[in-house]
Amino acid sequence: MTKPQHHEIVVIGAGICGASIANELLERGKAVCLIDAASTPASACSSHAYAIAHPHIGKGSPRLLRLTRIAFLLAEARWGLVWKAHGIFQPTKKDKEFVLEELVDYLESLGLDNTMALPLDAEEAKKICGISQSGVWLPRGASLNLQEATQQLLNNQQRLTCMWNTRVMRLENHDEKWFLYGEDQEEILSADKAVIAAAMESKCLINSIGIRLPLKPVRGQLSIFSVAPDSPWAPKLPSVGISGEGYCLPAERLGDGSYRWIVGSSFDESEDDLSPRDSSDDFNREQAKGLVQYLDGDPNGLKKSGEFVGVRCVAGDRLPIIGALNQRPGIFLATALGSRGVLWSALAAKLIAAQVLDEDLALLARFGFAADLVAALAPARFFAGALAAPSALGALASNSKPVFPSGPNTK
């Protein structure tokens, strides 16, 4: 019987996050083994072809706002070849008054200059974005195909070993090495360091080494609508992306004169059903009316032509969990990315690589990271009490008292 291979670094999960981390380590000259239960990369939520990316400027903790700015800049640099920068408009919330001076000061406090975020009154927004609403124009906001981006990260990598159709069920530590076991309890391989980037599947792997974290699924359905050229909806369709109560991409005119419009998405907490739902399409039709301020629009004018259903993984405080699991040396986590996988994956690549390679985290300051931001992402923020020593793998971390308060639902 062939002895299972040993690798210095294994990354579990070949979605956009796992691929980003693997790519960063490969670019640093390390050999990486990437393992996934599917037959190809980006098979689950990362098969999303219509993801959007922009800095977060709305309600949220100061750490969240600072982190999304850093993550956006990292994402923009990492995915330049598949980055579709069509701009994104974020309308003023219905319960908020548009006060230009206050908004300018607020954006400056977030470190966002005019190339990243520009406040517009309704008249200016009409000229620039074609939308008669006040709000913030994010000219570098973009969309991208996550599957294409993931594949690009893994192409032509000589130091990369991929293991497909291989589900990891548990991990064990022996002699300062981590052993990965499959569905039949067989040993798959061993590694000095393991990065867990498997979305909701991270939960059982973390549990297998005696750690519990507050992860839960959130189902989301995106609707692809067809709009006839003579429909009253046609002149209302946006030429830019919009992010507000829901989001949409710019409408695309097709060869027959009709329009293709992507609108989403539902936010079904604690659900992981991937079956399409008519109710989710109806929900997205209502969101579409609000996004373009066409409140009396006939929802029947948005004909369903397709959908994308994905299950996001979120933590209780809506921040991702990215960092070394210090109580289990050699284990690193990158999960709970929610609906900001584009941004958090780029950030995770830098942070996890620095930790895996034992770099001084002060070096991350060049990207804008400060110690409090690293701590805000760390798994340890959920531990109310001290964990047992790493050898006592039966001990469980408490998740009853997260350090940070819950944030608003991510759309």
Image (cartoon, grey):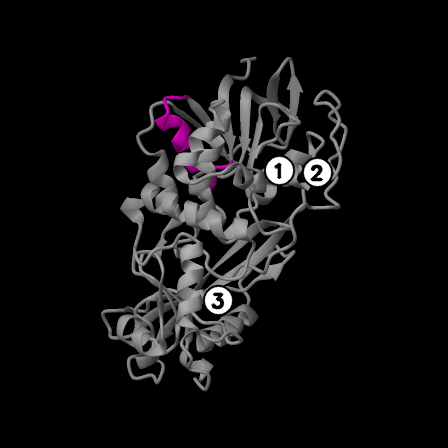
Residue 224 appears anywhere in the view:
no
Pointer 2: what residue? 383
Please tell me whether the stretch drawn in magenta is mainly helix, strand or loop: helix
Amino acid type assigned to the residue bearing label 2 in the image: Phe
Which comes sooner in the sequence, label 3 or label 2?
3
Camera-nearest residue between 132 and 329: 132
Of the residues shown, which amino acid type is indicated by label 1?
A: Pro
The image shows residue 322 at horizontal and vertical percentages of 54, 38
| For residue 271, side relative to residue 278 (left or right) | right
How many angstroms separate mark 1 from mark 2 (CA)? 8 Å
Amino acid at pointer 3: Gly
- Residue 205: where, in percent of width, then height? 64, 34
Q: Give yes or no for residue 112 being in the magenta stretch.
A: no
Q: Which residue is mark 1?
A: 379
Labels 1 and 2 touching (C-beta < 8 A) = yes
Left or right: where does residue 112 sit relative to residue 6? left
Please give the name of the residue rendered at 64% of the width and 13% of the height, measured from the top-left corner.
Answer: 175
User: In the image, what residue occupies the spot 30% across and 30% down?
Assistant: 156
Q: In terms of depth relative to the viewer, which is nearer, 7 or 136?
A: 136
Q: Quadrant of residue 193?
A: top right
Mark 3 = which residue? 246
Horizontal and vertical percent for residue 177? 60, 17
Image height check: is 190 above or below 252?
Answer: above
Q: State how far apart marks 1 and 3 are (Cα).
A: 29 Å
Residue 27 in the magenta stretch? The answer is yes
Q: Which span of residues is magenta-colored?
A: 13-30
Secondary structure of the residue carrying tag 1 is: helix
Question: Element under label 2?
Answer: loop
> Residue 340 location in percent, x, y?
48, 51
Earlier sequence position, callout 1 versus callout 3: 3
